[in-house]
Image: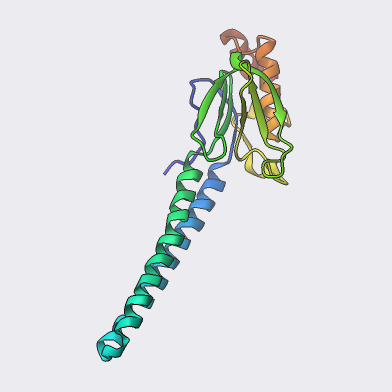
Amino acid sequence: MDLTPRALDDGTLLYATPTAAWRRWMLTVAAAGIVLILATAFLGAVIVTTAFILNDRFSLLFLVTLGFLTLMVLGAVVPLVWLVVLVRRTVFAVTTEGLTLTPPFGRPRHVPWAEVAHLEVADGMYMAGAVVVVTSTGERITASRTNGPDPQRHFYSATPASARTGLVIPFNAAQDALERYRRGKFTDGQQRHDEQAGTR
């Protein structure tokens, strides 16, 4: 399964987060949690069923316990499945055509460079440090997975040329690309020249 972040445009990928390794780790944790919960519920059901078969007095206990186990499984598996879906679709990608970002609890969306008025860094408690895209219409879109105490752990450069820029924080990567777009660096000829020369 390919877990590499994908942009929603056809531009050259400059930066992306989270990494495929981070996604793989999160999906492994979620899968292990689901297996553990199901195994616990199955074991509990076997024990209660055995007690019910051996003694009819346990029939009420059986129903209560079975109901509790069912609620436990649903209460734990549903959030884990939601986590898997969220991990699979969360992306922040910077390309020569624009940004692909996922608002908190939203679907990935593409914002072309022409529609970006400016970029900001969120200062709220929940998303402090995250990239905020302010569009030309005034809409503010906060990008998931671009904040945290150490954003560079979840970040990688797509090409050797971009690796030499030394920009590892998502905001700086997006800001750099926006400035390059405004300087006309992303025209086809200039893009090819930059990639061959390994310059910014």
Q: How are the colours assigned in the image?
A: rainbow
Name the residue rendered at 62%, 10% in the picture.
Answer: 190
Q: Quadrant of the N terminus?
A: top left
Placement of 193 over or under 6, stated as above or below: above
Name the residue rendered at 70%, 23% in the picture.
Answer: 176
Say left or right for 169 vs 142.
right
User: Is residue 164 something one can see in this rendering?
Assistant: no
Q: Quadrant of the C terminus?
A: top right
Say left or right for 5 vs 164.
left
Placement of 55 over or under 116, stated as above or below: below
Say left or right for 172 vs 38.
right
Q: Residue 6 at x, y = what percent?
A: 49, 32
Is 60 or 22 nearer to us in this picture? Answer: 60
Placement of 195 over or under 48, stated as above or below: above
Is 14 or 181 nearer to us in this picture? Answer: 181
Say left or right for 71 vs 200.
left
Is 124 or 59 nearer to us in this picture? Answer: 59
User: Is residue 63 something one can see in this rendering?
Assistant: yes
Judged from this view, the residue extending furthest toward the front is 60
Q: Residue 90 at x, y = what percent?
A: 52, 39
